[in-house]
Amino acid sequence: MGGKEKRKREAEEVAEDSEEEVVAEEEASTAPIDVEKSLAPADDGGVWFVLEKASLEAAKVGKNYQLLNCDDHANFLRKHKRDPAQYRPDITHQALLAILDSPMNKAGKLKGLYVHTEKNVLIQINPHIRIPRTFKRFCGLMVQLLQKLVIRATNGPDKLMKVVKQPVTRHLPLGARRIGMSYSAPKVVQLREYITASKETTPLVFVVGAMSHGKIEVDYIDDLVAVSQYPLSAMWAIARICNSLESQWNIV
């Protein structure tokens, strides 16, 4: 089998594997997009996550569209005068797994999950989705989403992922406390104590950067804090958040 045919077959296998877990609903890019203004009432408690500056960009490489990443597309990115180090969709993959696999989510406390990309695309993710475990399948799924705007469940009409209108604040509940996470924040907090200081019924929104370098720069947060005196990956910052919330809510 020639090299081109082999690469084509691998791309087809990625798409087929991704569709085993979720099925993409094809929609025209000009079609109207459903918007949910809030996923839960403000007095219901719970937690929302927003992953900011996520590197999720699809491009046509050869004959197929692929999710750009620094390992597989370094030459392609340099050719187009881009820095390969900025293309890290694996960070978003790890962060999503950390949130969705947490006991907190399984206990029903995750009320909303959003990903805001570097290309200014806002993605809403259903807490009940099962994200592909391998990075290769995840990339195939993200390409489908960015092209078709919606991913549906195989066994029903539920939308597991979809592109929604901005800004993200229109999807967050009123009265929520919006907390940004950054190593460069002016204060380091003990997260359990910090969360305990909030009312139990106050919805909490955590905004975490999903990029390799830099910090989140958004104007909708109420507070900016660091959860360690050391720089942490998005996955580890999320793990600390989830652990603290599970302790607060007595989730074992």
Image: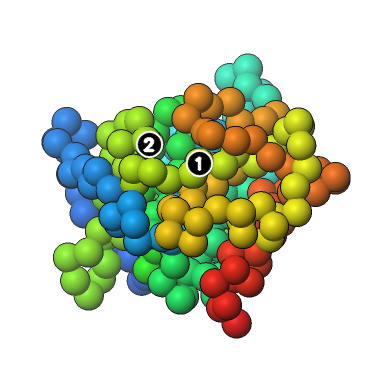
Give 71 or 169, whichever is nearer the viewer. 169
Marks 1/2: CA–CA distance:
12 Å
Give 63 or 114, whichever is nearer the viewer. 114
Residue lying at the far left in this picture: please name it. 31
Identify residue for label 1.
178
Q: Is residue 4 visible?
A: no
For the point 35% across and 30% down, the residue is 167
Q: Dot 2 lies on which element?
A: helix
Image location (x, y in percent) of residue 62: 47, 36
User: Which three-letter amino acid code belongs to the residue tagged 2?
Assistant: Val
Q: Is residue 186 above or below residue 190?
A: above
Give 238 or 82, whichever is nearer the viewer. 238
The image quadrant that residue 55 belongs to is top right
Image location (x, y in percent) of residue 6: 52, 56
User: Which three-letter amino acid code belongs to the residue tagged 1?
Assistant: Arg
| Horizontal side of residue 100 vs 27, given as left or right | right
Residue lying at the far bottom in this picture: please name it. 252
For the point 63% across and 22% down, the residue is 82
Which class describes the residues within 10 Å of circle 2: few (<14), some (14-19), or many (20+)? Answer: some
Residue lying at the far right in this picture: please name it. 229
Which class describes the residues within 10 Å of circle 1: few (<14), some (14-19), or many (20+)? Answer: many
| Horizontal side of residue 114 vs 173, given as left or right | right
Q: Nearer the viewer, mark 1 or mark 2?
A: 1
For the point 68% across and 25% down, the residue is 83
Q: Dot 1 lies on which element?
A: strand
Mark 1 or mark 2: which comes first in sequence?
Answer: 2
